[in-house]
Every structure is written in structure tokens, then in C-alpha cells.
Image (cartoon, helix red, strand yellow):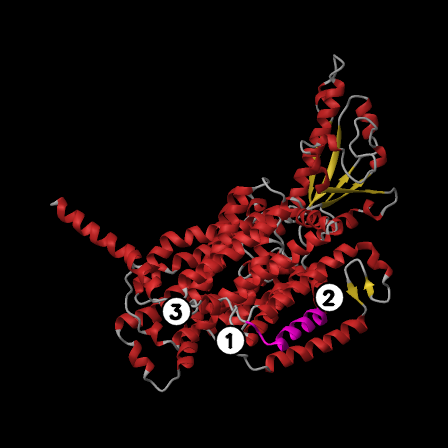
Amino acid sequence: MRWSNVWTIFGREVRDQVRDRRTLFMVFVLPILLYPILGMGVFVVTTNNLNEQREIIILGAEHLPASPPLLNASGDGFNPALFDVPTDVDKLRVTVAKPGSPWEKPEARQMGIREKVVKAIILIPPDVKARLEREGSAKIPIDYLSTNEGSQLTYFRVREVLARWNEKIVQGRLAKDHKTADYVEPVRTTGSDLATKAEAGGNIWAKIFPFLLVIMALTGAFYPSVDICAGEKERGTMETLLISPASRTEIVIGKFLTVVLASMMTALLNLISMGLTGLQLASKISSMSGEGAAAIIAPPTLIAGFWMVVLLIPLAVFFSAICLALAVLAKSMKEGQYYMTPLYMVSLPLILLTLAPGVELTPFFSLVPITGVGLLLRSLLQGDYAVARQYFLPVLVPMIIYGVVALRWAVDQFNREDVLFRESERFELGAWLRSVIRYRQETPSPGQALLCFTLMLVTAWFATQAIGDTVSPLVGMGLGHLVFILLPPILMAFLLTSNPARTLRLARPSARFVWLAVGLALALNPLVREFGHQVDRLFPPPKQVMELVQSLMKIIPENLGLGLLVFALIPSITEEVAFRGFILSGLERGYRTWTAILFSALLFGFLHVLLSLFNQLFPGMVLGVVLGLLAVRSRSLLPGIVFHLINNSLGVVMVAVGDRAKGLTWLFRDAEHGLFHWPIVAVTGAISAWLLVDLTRSKTAEPEVRV
């Protein structure tokens, strides 16, 4: 073997790989961009779960000894001295049940825990004080539900608190000598698990089956998609299909149905095989260990199997549409395989989130693709049909919408000749940089627009971690907007486009559009506040995040000018330059106008999710559509900046007015939340509708003078 030839071949293959742009993206760029975004999502979810306050009922608190105290002075929480971190005491909220309370009935306790009214119930025996005074021991039962992760976590926390209380009692007894063995263990906690054997067995499958269902549906959809799209390109049969009487849309729908069938059959056959294996395994363990052990791993019931088949349909539709759209992009089967890795990297965290402690089905998670279906299936397998009925449509409808959007994307890809018949691409960094500088277009491409958005997120994420607490949150917020939101689009506009002024819409608009922006900002404000209040009610933000927001807002009553600068003026300029300037211009170059506006609004809302509060997604998207329409029709950023400035300024002024707004009863029906009386909402809503119709029907204006 001649090693010189080996190294030559090795060098050739390495050069081929690094020249392929998609390979470079999948291997190097994607991990760098993806993990910070996923890290932000995991951080938000983890913080929310760790700081959740859990409700506990104590029965017989009057029997507790005065020293050492188990509860605090007010009786609504545990003694802070029993915690390593004093702030942890706020995570357990205690309610002392009075003698004769309905909670004394076992049926009421079981119903309260099952319906999630409380997480755990502590039963203090009547003779606990006498036993402890005699230096004996007492058993303190704790009712909880092991199939509910929130209840189980609460049980563990309460048990730790009682263990610390036990240590306090032992420390008091250690002042004496010659005591009994019970002296060192005065309190023993005994857990009373209310879950039946069938529920415990279903809880195990409820954690396994959602994960397996997603992986099987994804795998079953991906490989057929690659074969019937990229495989046809390699076999040379794509051209024959395209000249057939069928339209491009009909071809895509036919292929889509084929992939959906393959995805469902793959998942169903695997689930059936697993169910049969579970039956056989349960039978063998039953013969060896008795019926109790078999119940823990018993296979799911026929009802659970039915729900798995029902929820498999939206999953198969969703994955089939996405896989088909990605497979159309691939030139060959080999290239198609490269797309499998990022698809798995995005899907796995979403389904693994259902296994995280404390994550339950909420209005927010019902909108998250894959996660919502997994949590709904988990509730059904656990027999929690009350939650399943409540969230069945909120989970199913968004998944169908996501599938329709992905299918539309696949149809658009199939209608592009440059996608269907593109040649293999070679990528050389030097040549690419020269071409970017030499052959710059007037406006950016959609890919460059998305790159700008990603750079803003990634730089903001790393900078936030690096800066930490070195600067005040208010200063950090202002600098963050200027450096991480304003700077990337400006630099990319000058580096990647030949006409930065057109890209950033730096034109003097018609006065008509400026007045339209003013009117819309004022008329829409009551509706925006109404909508925001409903979103906050459905998607309450974490307590820790709200405390941070409130600490930032304290500066507004003291310094209104600084508040307007940080919360209104700076964001109105930076966000408009980024989203209605560079990003919207890039999206317009590759998509229809309304598609570009909706896409940019989605990105605008998503920015607020990752950098502030997840409940700002919907208000951000709605306002993003109005701002995008203003930018497109006026061909200028100025109307959008005016609208953005007025909208944010009204919110700042409401915070500055504070309690004084309660005196304006003729204006507000709920001054605390800034909610106007319904007649005002109705009138301003009608005015807003009229102005939006007028703006939508307006012809796109020609800019008068470049700024």
C-alpha cells in the first residue's frame, strides 16, 4: 500500500466536502447557531419549572409543637430556617386547614390531588406533640400522586423540609443524655401514593410512547420523501413526471399522501410490535414476580392505542410535509441524507421536553409543534381525560396549520425550476467572498435576511452571558438594542447590497402614510391592550421574569424621559431598521409580498419570545403585520417608526401614571391593566378596521426623496 496515494485521495475527498456549502452548514454552522437558541428555550422552561410555587394543605397544624417551629409566624409557609436557601421557602405555599374542614375526608383529599387543586397534603396526628415531648417518634403521612410529576416533586421537597425539622428536634435532644433509640429519629414520613397499579403502569408508557411515536413518524416520513424526490432526480425520471398532464401541485399532493401513508404504517407497525412484546414480557414477569410487578409494565389499553392512532395522523401530516419540502431541495440521495441530522436535532429537544420534570400541558405548550402532541398523548395515556378534552383542539388545530404551511412550502419548491434542476454546488470561501462584493444585488436575498436574524439572536445570547451583571439591566437593554439589533442589519446592508438606502427603506414617505401610522397607533392601542391582557391570562409569565420586568419599570415613574428613551425611542428605531428594513427587504425578494410580511412578523414575535417573554409572541406578530404593511405601502421606515414609537410610548405613560389612572373611571374599566371601557374599544376597533382597509387598498407609493 502506497501512502502517498492514500493521502492524495484523502486530500481530494476533504476538499470536496469543504467545497460543498450544505456540508459546511450542517457540520459547522448549524451546531453553532442551533444550540444557543435551544439553550435559551431550555433556560426559560427550566427557570419556570424551578420557581413554580406549589400548593400544600396541612391538616392538624394545631397539634404541632411550638418549638422547634415547622411553620412560619403567619402560618402560610414553612419555617425559613429549614431551608438552605431562604428564598426557597416561597416555592411551597402552605394552607392550614381548620378543624372540621372538608379536607379531613379521604375522598376530598384524593379528589383535590387528582384534580391538581393541591400538590400534596400533610396529615399531622393529634398525639404528635405528646409523643415528641416524651422523646418518642411520630409518623407524619403525606398524600401525593406519583403519576403527577408536580405532585411527586412537591412530596420530595416536603420530605426534605420535614427531615430538616427532624434534625432541629434531634439537636434539641442532644442537650441531654441517656435517651432511647427513638431519640435520634423522632419523625418518620410515610408517603401514601394514591395512584393505582394501572395508573402507575400507564405512567411509564406515557413517558415512552410519545417519544417513540414522534421518532417513528419522522423516520417513516423522511426516507420515502428522499427516495421519491431526490431519488427521482438521480434516476432521471423527474423530467418524465413533470411533462405528464398532472400539474405541479397535483404531483406534490400525490407524493405527500404517499409519504403520509408510509409514515403512519411505519409508526403503527412498530407500535403494534412493541405492544405485543410488552404483553409477552408482562406475562413472563407475572409468572416470576407476581401480578404486582406485571402491572407496572403492562401494555397500554385499547383506548390508549386508539388515541395514539388518532394523534399519529397530525404528526404524520406535519412530518411528511416538512420532509417532502426538504427532499425537493436535495440534488441526490446522498445530499438528502444530510438533511436528516438537523431535522432530528430540532425534533428531539421538542419531544424530550415532555420528559422534563414539571412540564405539563398548558396553552403555551399546546401551540409548540411536536411538544403539544406529546403532552396530550401523555395525558391520555395517564387517563387524565379532563386535561385531554380541554386541550385536544388547541393541540390538533395548530399542528394541522403547521402541516398546511409546510405543504405549501413544498408546492412552492416544486414550482421552482432552479430547485428541481439545480446542479451540484461547489463552495470556495475566497471565491464566494469576491462574488458577494463584486455582484451585490440592490437588496439582500431571503437567506441573507434569515442570517441577519440569526446573528442578532446568537450575538445577543452570547453577549448576555458574557456581560452578566456587570451593567445594570436598563443600560444592558439599551446597549443590546443598539449593538445586537441595529448594528448587524446596517453592516450587512453595506457589505452585501449595492443599495443600502433602498434595503433599509431610507426614503421620505408621503405625509398620508405618516398620518395613517399615527391614527392606527392611537386607534389600535385599546385593542392591543385588550389582546395583551387576554394573552397574559392564558400564558402567565414566570414569577421571576415578571419581577425582573417590574424592577425595570420602576425607573419610569422616577424618570419618564429615560423610560421613553429605553422602552420607546430606541426599540422603535432599532427593530424597524432590522425587521422592516433589512429582513423584510430580503424576504420580499424571494417571496410574495404578504408571505414576506407574515414571515417577518413571525420573526419579530419570535425575537420577543427569546429575549423577553414568550407571551409577547402573539402581540408581536399582530403588530408586525401592521408595521410590515406600513413599510411595504410607504416604501419607508418612517411610518413604522412613528407607529412603533407611539405604541410603546403609550405603554410607558400608562406605567408612569400608575395608581393615578384609577381616578379616570370615565376612561378605564380596569385601570390596573389599562383596559378601556367597552364602548371605547368598539369605536376604536371600528376606526382601526377602516384605517387598515384603507392601508391595504393603498397603492405602493413611490419614494419622493432619499434620505
Quadrant in which residue 633 is drawn: bottom right
The region drawn magenta spans 508-526
Q: What residue type is labelled 2?
A: Glu
Against 483, residue 425 (above or below) is below
Q: How far apart are the alpha carbons under marks 2 and 1?
A: 29 Å
Q: What residue type is labelled 1?
A: Thr
Please provide percent x and percent y for residue 545: 66, 49
Residue at figure coordinates x 41%, y 78% from the top left: 254
Q: What residue type is labelled 3?
A: Gln
> In front: mark 2 or mark 1?
1
Q: Which of marks 3 and 2 is nearer the N terminus?
A: 3
Left or right: residue 91 versus residue 341 is: right
Instruction: Indicate which disc residue 441 carries.
Output: 3
Q: Name the outermost residue toward the left.
A: 2
Circle 2 sits on which residue?
A: 530
Q: How many marks?
A: 3
Q: How far apart are the alpha carbons under marks 1 and 3?
A: 19 Å
Please provide percent x and percent y for residue 10: 21, 50
Task: Check if residue 117 falls in the magenta segment.
Answer: no
**SS at circle 3:** loop
On-image quarter of the N terminus: top left
- Callout 3: few (<14), some (14-19), or many (20+) C-alpha neighbours within 10 Å? some
